[in-house]
Amino acid sequence: MASLMRVAARRGCQVLRSKPVTKIIQPACFISTNKKKDSAAVAQNVGSRAEDDVADKDENWISFGYSLTDREEDTWAHNLLMFTGITIGLCMTGFYLAYMPDFKWQHWTQREAYLELARREKAGLPLISQDLIEANKVELPSDEDLGSMEIVI
């Protein structure tokens, strides 16, 4: 996805570099301080009108920003990026997150606990064994270490 975006950005930069720069020449009017009507002069080097430059292009076309010169390329690049961005970016990521395996083993541990409880009930054993840890391995503090601390059972 990132490489596709880089390619589209580079293509856009190439289009911008290849576009000829048109200079708009503004007509200048020079007026002298003379009161005669003949004293105003207009420069003849005006250039072509803006309407002549855009006459062959579509009148109301607004570019998506991928190609400033070719309407079909601009539409194709826009549709491609929107399709990949929405379909792959949103939909496929949603499917991946929804159907992702249990990487923290949370569901497995719960299923295993239910199976162990069913096995212990079937065998007539207590659900939690009192001898889970052997009594001779447990080190309890002496009465002197506890002092006057209250012990709640």
Image (cartoon, helix red, strand yellow):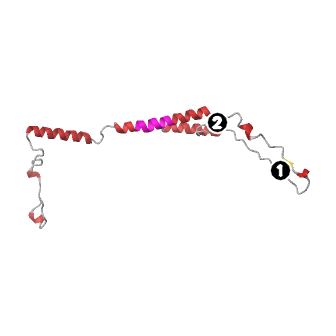
> Dot 2 lies on which element?
loop
Judging by the rendered image, the residue that carries numbered circle 1 is: 29
Mark 1 or mark 2: whose residue is earlier in sequence: 1
> Dot 1 lies on which element?
strand
Q: In terms of secondary structure, what is the magenta stretch mainly?
A: helix
Residue type pointed to by label 1: Cys
Which quarter of the picture shows residue 127? top left
Instruction: Using residue 8 as the reference point, say whether residue 97 is left or right of it.
Output: left
- The percent coordinates of residue 153 (x first, y second) are 11, 58
Is residue 88 part of the magenta span, yes or no? yes
- Residue at left 78%, top 41%? 47
Depth order, front residue of 18/27: 27
**Stretch of the chain drawn in magenta:** 82-93
- Residue at left 80%, top 43%? 46
- The percent coordinates of residue 8 (x first, y second) are 55, 37
Is residue 119 part of the magenta span, yes or no? no
Depth order, front residue of 55/72: 55
- Residue at left 44%, top 38%? 89
- Disc ID at residue 69: 2
Residue type pointed to by label 2: Thr
- The percent coordinates of residue 52 (x first, y second) are 74, 37
Q: How many marks?
A: 2
